[in-house]
Image (cartoon, rainbow, N blue to C red):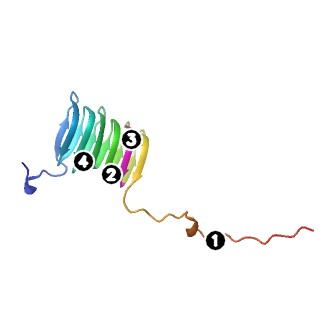
Amino acid sequence: MFGKDKRPAPDHIEAIIGPLTTFQGTLRADGTVRVDGVVEGGRIVSTSNVIIAKDARVQADIEAQVVSIAGAYKGTIKADRVELLAGSRVWGELHVRSFLLDEGGYFSGNLYMQGEAPEEPFRAEALPPVEEEPASEAS
């Protein structure tokens, strides 16, 4: 099929699930996947982006570089960036490096930030010692 030199550009829409289409199973693409219809289980794997349009409903696991959601989604996402746009409704587990939640978007679930964790400034050993005041003697 595609050799390394013949792969489509990463921003090229490789697969579209139309508004009157229902899909179930595993979908793999080297380009962007756009969902306008319904995905009822399975996986979507893209080396590029996944776009879930406003009227789309997706219940599947997703692995991609960037996932933009304007419709309804339920499942687990593993991506560099997830964008929950205004009007989106999302239930599930997100494993991301970068996360955006627009005003008017809804998220219920767990968010796991991937990558190198910054040093926590609230650890006991990171805080300066508290000096105790000498106890005053009552007469």
What's drawn in magenta, residue-wise? 89-97
Q: Main secondary structure of the magenta part?
A: strand
Side of 132 where 33 appears, left or right: left
- The quadrant holding residue 89 is top left
Element class at badge 2: strand
Residue placed under numbered mark 1 in the picture? 129
Q: Earlier in the sequence, mark 3 or mark 2?
A: 2
- The quadrant holding residue 73 is top left
Residue placed under numbered mark 3 in the picture? 92
Residue placed under numbered mark 4 in the picture? 49
Residue placed under numbered mark 2 in the picture? 81
Which of 100 and 109 lies nearest the eye of the viewer? 109
Q: Is label 3 or label 2 in front? A: 3
Q: Which residue is located at x 21 percent, y 40 percent?
A: 26
Q: Earlier in the sequence, mark 1 or mark 3?
A: 3
Local crowd at mark 3 within 10 Å, few (<14), some, or many (≥20)?
some
Q: Is residue 121 above or below residue 30?
A: below
Q: CA distance from mark 1 to mark 3?
A: 41 Å
Q: Earlier in the sequence, mark 4 or mark 3?
A: 4
